[in-house]
Image (spheres, rainbow, N blue to C red):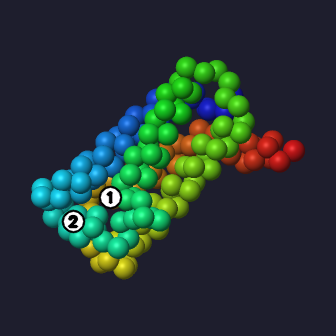
Amino acid sequence: MLFQDDNLLRIVVFVLGVCGFLVARHIHEHKKIGKKALVCPMKFDCNAVVHSDYSKLLGIPLEVLGMLYYGLVSVFYLFMIFMLQIPLPLVLFAVSLSIFAFLFSVYLICVQIFILKKGCFWCFVSALISILIFIATVYGYEVLTLMFQFLK
């Protein structure tokens, strides 16, 4: 078995994916409207962060990329809840995606802290969700075993 506690872990990651999607959509909706400021419960300057030069990657708003990532995670894990056997390349794709999202989240946190010197509560929540998905993925999959199987 790839998961140590199959369905519980799959459900947890599915719920995290849905929550991440909703956070990213919340940010996107407020940016799209433009007139309504993004309210930060922790008194951070969310608007400065989400409208900064670092809020896009290759011209694509980060919250849209976040919605795509979290949407993929949600759909993938929803299917996994009902599947007994997942093809190895699909598992490796999910693991790779979560590793990339984790590293990118750490980068974005560093940008907020060290470059912008401003924070965004919603961005931190999204990063936390991404980190939790990464931890659950690493915990749930025997990552090194999978890598060795794929390389054989």
Q: Left or right: where does residue 95 sit relative to residue 42?
A: right
- Asked if residue 83 is positioned above or below residue 28 in the image, the reply reads above
Residue at the location (51% across, 56% down)? Answer: 102
**Element assignment for label 2:** helix
Residue under numbered circle 1: 123
- Asked if residue 71 is positioned above or below residue 99 in the image, the reply reads above
Residue at the location (36% across, 79% down)? Answer: 115
Q: Which mark is residue 78?
A: none
Residue under numbered circle 2: 47
Position of residue 30 measured from the top left corner of the image (x, y, whole percent): 21, 53
Q: Nearer the viewer, residue 31 or 100?
A: 31
Assess disc 1: are there few (<14), some (14-19) or many (≥20) residues with their C-alpha within 10 Å of its C-alpha: many
Quarter occupied by the C terminus? top right
Mark closer to the observer (2, 1): 2
Q: Amino acid at mark 2?
A: Asn
Q: Left or right: where does residue 102 sit relative to residue 55?
A: right
Labels 2 and 1: the sequence-earlier one: 2
